[in-house]
Image (tube, helix red, strand yellow):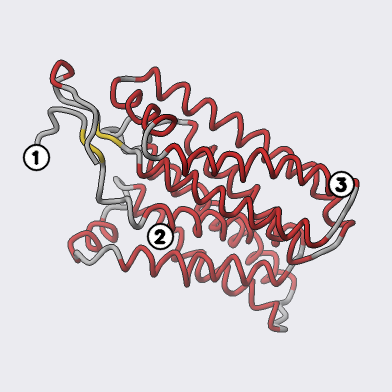
Amino acid sequence: MVTVGLRPQREWVKDRPPAIFFGTLGAATYIISLITGFKLGLVIGWVLIILVKLPVIAAYTPNRAHLTYILNNLKKSWVSRGTLGIALFAIFGGLYALQFFGVAYPYPAWATLYALSLITAGIVLVYDGFVQAVNKPITFWANGSLPILLTSLAFLSALLLVNSLVSSSSFFTTTWIYINIALALSSYSLVTHLWSSNLMDVAGHESVTRLLKGDLRGFFITGVVLSLVLTAIISNALLVYYMTWLLYLNTILVLIGNYFIIYSMIKVGIYKPLLYPWSKPAKV
C-alpha cells in the first residue's frame, strides 16, 4: 500500500514496547551487576533478555518468512545483528552468570567470559534503539537521539533496580552520582528528540503533537513525571534520608514511568506522507 497521507505504524505496537523495555532493562542490569560484582543481578538480567524478551518477540512473529529474513541478513539488517548479539549473550552471559550458582572458573576463562559477556550485553542494550532509528519511513523514530534515550532510561531503571536488590545505603551513596547522570542524560535526550522530531517534517510534527496533546498525552506525561521528575526528587532525598521502602517505591515508579514513555513513543510512530498536500492527521 502506498502511503499518501499520514498513516500510523501498527505492526510493532504490541511487541516492541515490552521487548524494548525488558531487553534494555535486562542488558543494563547485567552490565551494572557485572561491574559491581552483584551476581544475582547477572541472573536477573539474563532472564529478562532470554526468558522474557525473546518469548515476547516470538509470540508476535508468527510469520516464518520474517524469521528466515532475520537469520539470513546480517549484512543488511539491524534486527539480524541484534538477534546474533542476543544469541551470543545467551551463551557467554549465561556461562558467566553461573557463578551465582557456585560455578568457579580459572582466571583466563573468567576474564574471557567477563569481556565477552560485557560486549554482547552492550550489543543487546543499544540494539533496540538502532532498530527503531534506522526505520527511515517513520521520522519520529529515525532520530539519532533515540538510541541514547533508550539506553539512558534503561541505565536509570537498572541502577535503581540493583539498588533495591542490594538494599545498602553505602551502595546507594556510591551509585547516586550515576543515577543523576542517567537522569540528566535521559531528560536531555528526550527534550532533544521531541524538539528535533517536531522540526523534521510533517510526520514528525504530527507524532509530537499526538504525544503532547493527543490521546497518548496521559501515558507520556505520566511516564515523564514518574520516571524523571519524581525519581529525581526521591533519589536526591534518599541521599540524605535513606529509607528502604522509599527506595523500593522509587524503583517501582521509574519502571512504570519508563514503560509508559517507551509505549507512547512506539505507539505514536507515523509514516511520512508521499504527497504533503494530501496529508491529514493520522487516524488510529
Name the mark nearer the viewer: 3 or 2: 3
- Could you say which quadrant of the image residue 204 lies in? top left
At numbered mark 3, what does the secondary structure look like: helix, strand or loop? helix
Q: Amino acid at mark 1?
A: Met
Point out residue 130 in the picture as x, y percentages from the top left corner.
42, 42
Query: Which residue is tagged 3?
Result: 239
**Label 1 vs 2, first from the N-terminus:** 1
Name the mark nearer the viewer: 1 or 2: 1
Identify the residue at image location x=64%, y=73%.
Answer: 97
Image vertical order of residue 98 relative to residue 21, above or below? below
For the N terminus, the quadrant is: top left
Check the image and name the residue furthest to the left.
1
> How far apart are labels 1 and 2 at the CA level?
31 Å
**Circle 1 crowding by C-alpha within 10 Å: few under 14, some 14–19, many from 20:** few
CB atoms of marks 1 and 2 within 8 Å:
no
At numbered mark 1, what does the secondary structure look like: helix, strand or loop? loop
Identify the residue at image location x=36%, y=32%.
Answer: 210
Horizontal side of 198 relative to 73 (left or right) equals right
Q: Amino acid at mark 2?
A: Leu
Query: Which residue is tagged 2?
Result: 84
Q: Amino acid at mark 3?
A: Leu
Identify the residue at image location x=48%, y=64%.
Answer: 88
**Circle 2 crowding by C-alpha within 10 Å: few under 14, some 14–19, many from 20:** some
Depth check: 246 or 20 in front?
246
- Could you say which quadrant of the image residue 41 lies in? bottom right
Q: Which mark is residue 1?
A: 1
> How far apart are labels 1 and 3 at the CA level?
55 Å
Horizontal side of 134 relative to 182 (left or right) equals left
**Label 1 vs 3, first from the N-terminus:** 1
Point out residue 85 in the picture as x, y percentages from the top left corner.
45, 58
At numbered mark 2, what does the secondary structure look like: helix, strand or loop? helix
